[in-house]
Image (cartoon, grey):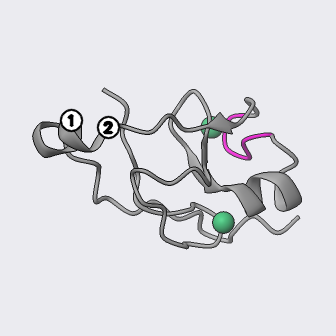
């Protein structure tokens, strides 16, 4: 199951499970759309893979398969 992380790994802003601003790589590294575009240029800084928009889990499914509450933040942010 996809881990729906609650925040951007770069700027630590909140990303709701139904946010259309959340971007992920294949390892579920999670970023907001602003960081993904402006700071990362669509490439995950951890694994080098591409970032795509995270699919939204339907609200009814969140009741039985809740989003992650584990915040992951990159130690020094994503400033290049
Ligand atoms: Zn961000
Ligand atoms: Zn990654």
| Residue at horizontal 84 percent and vertical 60 percent from the top | 39
| Residue at horizontal 80 percent and vertical 40 percent from the top | 43
Count of residue discs = 2
Circle 1/circle 2 CB separation < 8 Å: yes
Q: Is residue 71 above or below residue 40?
A: below
Decide which of 32, 56 is in the foreground and name it. 56
| Residue at horizontal 37 percent and vertical 31 percent from the top | 2
Residue 46, magenta (yes or no): yes
* Left or right of residue 57: residue 47: right
**Disc 2 within 8 angstroms of ligand 1 (CB):** no
Find disc 2 in the rendering and name its residue: 58
Q: Residue 61: which disc?
A: 1
Q: In the rendered image, which quarter is residue 53 located in?
A: top right
**Element type where label 1 sits in the image:** helix
* Left or right of residue 4: residue 45: right
The range drawn in magenta is 43-47
Q: Residues within 10 Å of mark 2 (few under 14, many from 20)?
A: few
């Amino acid at each position: 199951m996809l881990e729906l992380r609650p925040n951007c790994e770069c700027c630590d802003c909140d990303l709701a499970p139904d946010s259309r601003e959340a971007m992920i790589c294949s390892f579920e590294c999670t970023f907001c759309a602003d960081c993904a575009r402006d700071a990362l240029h669509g490439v995950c800084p951890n694994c080098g893979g591409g970032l795509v928009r995270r699919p939204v889990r339907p609200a009814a499914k969140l009741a039985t398969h809740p989003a992650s509450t584990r915040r992951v933040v990159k130690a020094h942010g994503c400033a290049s």
